[in-house]
Image (tube, coloured by chain):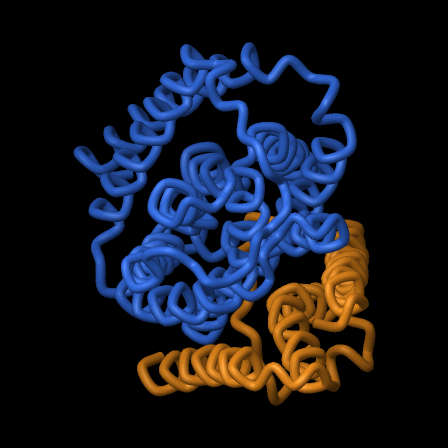
Chain colours: A blue, B orange
Amino acid sequence: MEVGLLMLVGGVAAGLFGSLLGLGGGLLIVPLLTLGFGLPLRESVGVSLVCVIVTSSASAGIFLQRRQADLRLGMTLELFTAMGAIAGGLFAFLLDERVLAALFAGLLVYVAVTMARASTAAGSTTQNADRPAGPPYRRLPAAIVGSVGAGVFSALLGVGGGTVKVPVMHLLMGIPLRVATATSNLMIGITASASAFVYLIRGGIDVYAVGPTAVGVFIGATIGSRFGGRVHVRVLRLLFVVVLLFTAFEMARRAAFGA
Amino acid sequence: MNERLEPALARVLQVGTYVSMGLVALGTLLFIAGGGSPLDGGPVLDLARFPADLAAGRPTAILWLGVLGTLLTPGLRVVGAMVGFARAGEWRMVGIAVAIIAVVGVGIVAGLVTG
């Protein structure tokens, strides 16, 4: 009973943080389950993929209703993220867990540094348009390559891959940041479900661990999306950077010395 | 494009998520009430036994149904988009939707073959 409640609370925190900061919950769910509850890393990734689909579907529904997500662009790119995700899902079962832990630690440091820089530059990111302009799209071939990479990355580490997709669309294709974020959210569902089916078939999803964690993430993400506007994101972002760096250290230690 | 397509797809995602999470929550409550722990190590999905377990109201089967619903919801959105684009005569987008479904199908087959 206590373990279930702790997982639920951890899921709520991951969903809340993820929603307030525009990240999927995967960045926190994998370390929470691995470091906090002792689940094998690969199973934590499987559970995280299910949670990532939950947050993506819930938020993408809102973005589609507001017409912020570019459905055509999202579907075009998700075809390639899905291809990458299947390759990543199959490859994940061949990799040593310590290699996965090292990759995850690297990802956490990257996100922490990116967020810290965004915090210090707060106010300079006044992104403009929040409606998709539609086709034609600039640099689509390069974005397709980036999308395949985002899919591999998502499947290996159990994250949404927004840390790759959003920069690809925003910086490479010139899509407004809000539209890129909304479209990335839309794409995450198919990206994660493509690899989640591979995990499911290969016994990589622990359904008992999914239960409380996914429900918690769903509750946290719902609260975050309703009250996000009232929270001082800058302070939260700095706190999150500290949490990410600490988690990265723990994952790196696991990579170096094993469980 | 049909103006109603995006709100309709939004509803597919929202209803799919709420129903799936309701099933996951119900399965989890029944499982924990029966003395189970999330750290017990969940069983692999056994498709041969799944319908009978579900008919018997077993918590694990209810949990699996919720997880399957979660995994299928984004695919339902793609199917819905395919229908919407077909009605609007946007055949390039219909082709992309078909390709996405085919890729996910290939993933399932690849998982079965290599699993």
The quadrant where residue A231 appears: top right
Rendered view: B113 above or below A31: below
Q: Nearer the viewer, residue B14 or B33?
A: B14
- The C terminus of chain A lies in which quarter of the figure? top left
Rendered view: B41 above or below A36: below
Percent x, y for residue B95?
51, 85
Instruction: Residue at 36%, 71% (x, y): give it.
Output: A83
Rendered view: B26 above or below B88: above
Q: Nearer the viewer, residue A134 or A221?
A: A134
User: Is residue A66 something one can see in this rendering?
Assistant: yes
Q: Nearer the viewer, residue B23 or B45?
A: B23
In screen coordinates, is A47 left or right of A54? left
In screen coordinates, is B67 left or right of B10? left
Percent x, y for residue A37?
49, 38
Instruction: Residue at 46%, 17% (x, y): give it.
Output: A124
- The N terminus of chain A lies in which quarter of the figure? top right
In screen coordinates, is A219 left or right of A157? right
The quadrant where residue A107 appears: top left
Instruction: Residue at 54%, 13% (x, y): give it.
Output: A234
Percent x, y for residue A81?
40, 63
For this orientation, the residue located farthest to the left is A256
In screen coordinates, is A57 left or right of A28? right
Q: Nearer the viewer, residue A49 or A98?
A: A49
The quadrant where residue B34 appears: bottom right
